Image (spheres, rainbow, N blue to C red):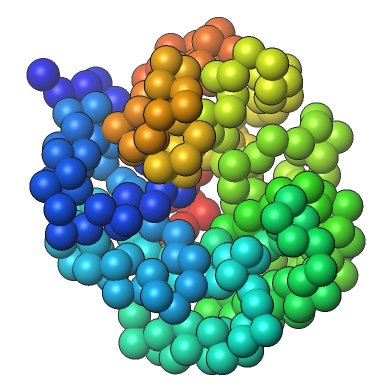
């Protein structure tokens, strides 16, 4: 039985399973759960074919981004960026992403992460596209960069937001929506307190599958069909029905990504 609402997963690596039966099974579960739009963030040059093959397989449902993930910013980052920039000229995309800063895995690459971020933000501005930001243990550095780069062309989503209320408000002031995922369902994350205080107009939903599965699947592989657990948690925090959360967050995603 179809759901009475439509949900949008604004960030999932569903394309990892392209060409496998699991892909078809996961997509069908998405449709059964009312998840009709799925945004696919790229991570490096090797993932571009998988992203695009997924889009070609589900052209009405899957929408691509292109970008270089901060954890993939290595010594050869200029070559990687050059290849991704060429791909931008041949593929229609809906955001530059995922891009950003990550100091959890490697603090030694911060300077080249920043440079890669600046370059990709300029792509987004030139193409009038949003950016999809990955930020892990680097909020201070990220906000410093965004303050440097901010203008009326800078906007997008702070994906998998797990920061404080002050950081949430600062991101919103800079023109960004907050991507809320499975972490909001974790009891000790503290994210529930933040989300409760943020207007739904500033929120989009995501799974970041196959990572960060929501309760009751925490610790297991995530998938986009689990998005409704996240929507239900946000609805509970705001004391509204899931239909309202679905309608507002889907409208937000359509506005940001130009669908």
Regarding residue 215, the answer to whether it shows in the image is yes
Query: Along the horizontal axis of the image, is 200 left or right of 2?
Result: right
Residue 85, given in percent of the width and then of the height, sits at 50, 87
Find residue 79 and report its horizontal and vertical position in percent.
Answer: 56, 91
Q: Name the residue rendered at 80%, 32% in the picture.
A: 164
- The quarter of the picture where the N terminus appears is top left
Q: Is residue 245 visible?
A: no
Instruction: Estimate the x, y position of residue 161 in percent, counting from the top left.
Output: 65, 40
In this rendering, is residue 131 above or below 116?
A: above
Which residue is painted at 65% across and 77% down in the image?
74
Q: Is residue 33 found left or right of 253 in the rendered image? A: left
40 to 128, vertically: above or below: above
Say if 148 sits above or below 247 in the image.
below
Q: Quadrant of the C terminus?
A: bottom left
Q: Is 90 situated above or below 202?
A: below
Seen from the viewer's position, the closer of residues 216 and 246 is 216
């Amino acid at each position: 039985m179809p759901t009475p609402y439509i949900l949008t997963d604004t960030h999932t690596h569903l394309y990892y399973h392209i060409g496998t039966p699991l892909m078809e099974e996961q997509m069908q579960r998405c449709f059964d759960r009312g998840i009709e739009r799925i945004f696919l963030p790229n991570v490096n040059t090797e993932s571009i074919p998988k992203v695009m093959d997924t889009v070609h397989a589900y052209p009405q449902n899957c929408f691509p981004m292109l970008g270089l993930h901060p954890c993939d910013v290595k010594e050869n980052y200029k070559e990687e960026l050059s290849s991704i920039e060429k791909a931008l000229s041949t593929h229609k995309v809906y955001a530059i992403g995922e891009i950003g800063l990550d100091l959890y895995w490697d603090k030694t690459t911060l300077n080249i992460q920043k440079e890669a971020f600046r370059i990709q933000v300029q792509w987004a501005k030139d193409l009038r596209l949003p950016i999809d930001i990955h930020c892990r243990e680097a909020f201070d550095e990220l906000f410093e960069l965004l303050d440097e780069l901010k203008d009326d062309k800078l906007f997008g989503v702070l994906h998998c937001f797990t920061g404080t209320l002050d950081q949430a408000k600062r991101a919103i002031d800079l023109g960004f929506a907050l991507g809320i995922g499975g972490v909001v369902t974790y009891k000790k994350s503290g994210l529930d307190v933040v989300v409760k205080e943020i207007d739904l107009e500033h929120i989009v939903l995501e799974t970041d599958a196959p990572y960060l599965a929501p309760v009751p699947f925490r610790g297991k592989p995530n998938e986009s069909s689990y998005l409704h657990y996240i929507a239900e948690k946000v609805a509970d925090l705001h004391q509204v029905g899931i239909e309202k959360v679905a309608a507002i967050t889907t409208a937000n995603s359509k506005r940001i990504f130009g669908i």
